[in-house]
Amino acid sequence: MDLVASLPAFVLAVVLISASPGPAMALILRRAALHGFRGAVPTVLGLEAGLYAWALFAAAGLAALVAASEVAFLVLRVVGAGFLLYLGLKSWRAVWRSRRSGTTPELAEDALSGPERSWWGAFGEGALVMLANPKAAAFMIAFYPQFVPADRPLFSTTALLALLQVAVEIALYLALAAVVGRAGAWFRRSVVRRRLEAVSGAVLITLGLRMAAETR
């Protein structure tokens, strides 16, 4: 299999994978709607940093160890599910406080936790959501070997393919964030913000519960 000849199929697979609903998509949509395009950028970069780390782990054989270890898989599943539940409950708490104070959920959250989450805070949130997803380990193990020729070094080739995947996903996710961010004036309405926070909280909690209940 020639690496260059397989790139179109690889890019198509990446586009289809990135468009599928999941924690990453929910996090990006929520962040772009509530904080605009600029607010979604660190979340996207954090998610992709976590994805690239998993790709390197897969190339080094560490992801296979995680996927094969019952304890490691369980720990990641619990941490990932717990963090998604935390984010969902945090959204609901912001809605509840905003109704009591008469402010938007964003202002109610700021009153509780200080200024708006920093750039690095949003970046870390995205990275943790990706790194604490055990399914990412299993996916990387199965995905990349299909596109790495037998005569090429596994680690460096996987690292290059992962860079391509990260570039494609960043472009797609930032385009999505830009489209959502353009509707910022509508999303800034307090009633809309409350409903969006409530819905996104429900989605994140559902994803967390699903991750907690998933088996291999």
Image (cartoon, helix red, strand yellow):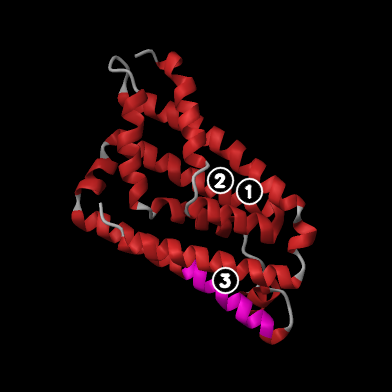
- Label located before the other in sequence (3 or 1): 1
Camera-side residue of 47 and 147: 147
Q: Residues within 10 Å of mark 3 (few under 14, many from 20)?
A: many
The answer to the question of whether label 3 and label 1 lie on touching residues, with beta carbons closer than 8 A, is no
Say which mark, if any, is on residue 91. Answer: 3
Inspect this view and state whether residue 55 appears: yes
Say which mark, if any, is on residue 41. Answer: 1
Please give the residue where the numbered disc 2 appears in the rendered image: 45
Query: In terms of secondary structure, where does tag 3 sit?
Result: helix
Residue 88 vertical position relative to residue 50 in the rendered view, above or below: below
Q: Residue at x 50, y 41 (%)?
A: 18
Q: Which corner quadrant of the image does residue 54 belong to?
A: top left
> Percent from the top left, x then y, of residue 52?
44, 39
Camera-side residue of 163 and 11: 11
Examine the structure image and report whether residue 34 is included in the region drawn in magenta: no
Q: Which corner quadrant of the image does residue 34 belong to?
A: bottom right
Give the amino acid at mark 1: Val
The answer to the question of whether label 2 and label 3 lie on touching residues, with beta carbons closer than 8 A, is no
